[in-house]
Image: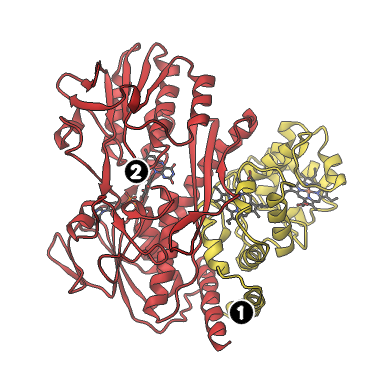
Chain colours: A yellow, B red
Amino acid sequence: MLRTIIFSSVLVSFLAIISVNATERSATTLSYACAGCHGTAGVSAGTSIPSLAGLPSEYFIEAMQKFKNGKRGATIMDRIAKAYSNEEIVAMAGFFEQQTWVAASIEVDAEVVAQGQTIHEDKCARCHLAAGKYTEYRLPRIGGQWADYLYFYMKNAQIEGFKQPQPKLMKKSLEGLTEAELTALAQFYAAQ
Amino acid sequence: MLNMKRRNFIKAGGVVAAASLAGFPFISFGKSTGRVVIVGGGYGGATAAKYLRLADSNIKVTLIEPKTHYISCPMSNEVLAGERNISSITVSYQALNTNYGINLVHQMATEIDPVQKNVRTADGRNFPYDRLIVSPGVDFRWDAIAGYDESAVAAMPHAWNAGNQTLLLRKQLVAMEDGGLVIIIAPPNPFKCPPGPYERASQIAHYLKQHKPKSKILILDQKDKFSKQGLFKQGWKQHYAGMIEWIPASQDGKVLAVHPDKMMIETDFEEHEGDVINVIPPQKAGKIAQMAGLTDKTGWCPVDQKTFESTIHKDVHIIGDASIAGKMPKSGYAASSQAKVCAAAVAALINGQTVAEPSYVNTCYSLITPNHGVSVSAIYQLNDEGNIVSVKGAGGLSPMDASAWEREQEANHAHSWIRNILSDSFG
Ligand SMILES: Cc1cc2nc3c(=O)[nH]c(=O)nc-3n(C[C@H](O)[C@H](O)[C@H](O)COP(=O)(O)OP(=O)(O)OC[C@H]3O[C@@H](n4cnc5c(N)ncnc54)[C@H](O)[C@@H]3O)c2cc1C
């Protein structure tokens, strides 16, 4: 109850700023329309489309801007992001940040997960803290995200010329990892 | 400025209510005790019911729908291919009651009285409303093709409403011998799911290629071009070369009559005999919309495209396939997107608020094989004339030069989409 009240008061002041920027379409109106693919309130039920609930707004804005400007490779988000103004992207970022993260529920193979954990600790843990559950600013949460989505992201990140945003160190960490190893990583994170 | 604050307050209400999904109690900002009745629990009606309660939990929502389970048309083409069990696209309405307190009435609505503002159901009960939302889907024009009446569907299924008709068509495909001919009659515009007949041809071809590779598919089209045509033709060439033949209306695709007893189709110059014949008839708004006088001479329902209120009867809103929604196609995604816009408008109108500026989205995925998906997407807004138009410079088709790996990702996204749209609408 307390949390709900805080949520709404934060949002009211947030939206007041947006309104000055003449966003006519409200954050909820805009964001509800994404739910057919990303799930109600950004909690995805599909294995390859990511949950958006609780994403840091900085990361969300950055991701949408990159889709919009052709700086992030995509199967569909590039086409979708182009429809929204910068103000509208900021408004949606506020909406999704306020939603509660729900971890993916998938069946995993304990052995594969353990294998993924070893690679994670070796190559990824320095940035993706707390088994990938840590999120701040421009670092997205990957612990509890859907495995297929994570797998696609990593696989695309290995393809030369596919614009998948990643720090240089992440690119280096992913280099040479086999499909089986990527699967293990994806399962490890999804299980968090 | 005061006014502005009030509007923000309402916007915030929507957000908080959405959070109630994660276990928060309903918080209501409106003081209304309005009664909204919804006729038809498809993608349109079910979504409208849920999002109305999220917008204002003081509104009493009654959903009138004869079936206790909804069977999704989207992905039903995979059932034809044997790639999916129909139970995987069958959902109960119960969650709408349990999670959102929607009153479920499993009856057929038989009469709408827009003057008395009352809906009657087949069991003789009355449901008075302050506002009514009608989402009855499509009805077939049974008088459009000579020989194709309601008794013909046993021999020549339409399978354009998912359920027994889907299973019947599947059974016929399984029973057909290798080397057989499957004929699909594709309908004229506008109709439910513009890429649907061509996805269907693809899915049937996928099944035949594995089990009956000498068989062929003939599409007799009542028009000269179709949705995602380039992408479909590319996929057919790649996976089903020589198997699918498409005949446009202007090249003798136009059907004059069907003969279910002889399993034969007449066009201007030919008689085609088929082993399996799938007739997708021309369409119009669902029967109850016609009976209530909500349709115009096109057979569809004209609406104010901002609120989806009928331009014929006050306080009655029509969404989904039955409505005339500007440039939006008749799809499940479109119906659910319209439902959210309509729910917000109805909640605002009941509370005496201004109706917010709408935003609408549509995406249709089609599966050419289980690993080859393609899509078309658009984001819509209202123009100055009050018509729904797509936002320029955005949306569009999957690229023609996408890699096999990208097609595979899109096939996965199609499967994620069905899970999300079903849970967003019914869960
Ligand atoms: C083969 C096929 C594939 C498709 N694939 C896709 C796809 O991939 N993506 C996509 O977005 N769309 C797809 N569609 C389109 C989608 O199914 C429709 O656009 C969508 O169902 C429209 O929703 P609706 O609410 O308008 O109507 P419907 O979903 O048809 O629901 C209407 C409901 O109203 C009820 N009803 C009717 N009359 C009454 C009455 N008098 N009283 C009470 N209840 C009544 C019916 O029982 C029904 O449940 C596909 C369609 C087909 C046929």
Q: Nearer the viewer, residue B259 or B394?
A: B394
Would you place residue A105 above or below residue B5 in this image? above
Q: Chain of mark 1?
A: A
Occupied quadrant, residue A154: top right
The reply to whether residue B220 is visible in this rendering is no
Q: Nearer the viewer, residue B378 or B92?
A: B378
Residue located beneath label 2 in the image: B190
Q: Nearer the viewer, residue B327 or B106?
A: B327
Residue reaching furthest left?
B124
Would you place residue B237 above or below residue A178 in this image? above
The reply to whether residue B152 is visible in this rendering is yes
Q: Chain of mark 2?
A: B
Residue located beneath label 1 in the image: A12
Q: Residue at x 34, y 62 (%)?
A: B303
Q: Nearer the viewer, residue A118 or B68?
A: B68
Quarter of the picture holding the N terminus of chain B:
bottom right
Helix, strand or loop at label 2? It is loop
Would you place residue B92 above or below residue B73 in this image? below
Q: Position of residue B365 (x, y in %)?
A: 50, 40
Q: Residue B260 has which mark?
A: none
Other residues around mark 2 within 10 Å, as few (<14) / some (14–19) / many (≥20)? some
Q: Nearer the viewer, mark 1 or mark 2?
A: 2
Q: Relative to residue B162, is residue A167 drawn left or right? A: right
Label 1–label 2 contact, CB within 8 A:
no
Helix, strand or loop at label 1? It is helix
Would you place residue B204 above or below residue A38 in this image? above
Occupied quadrant, residue B326: bottom left
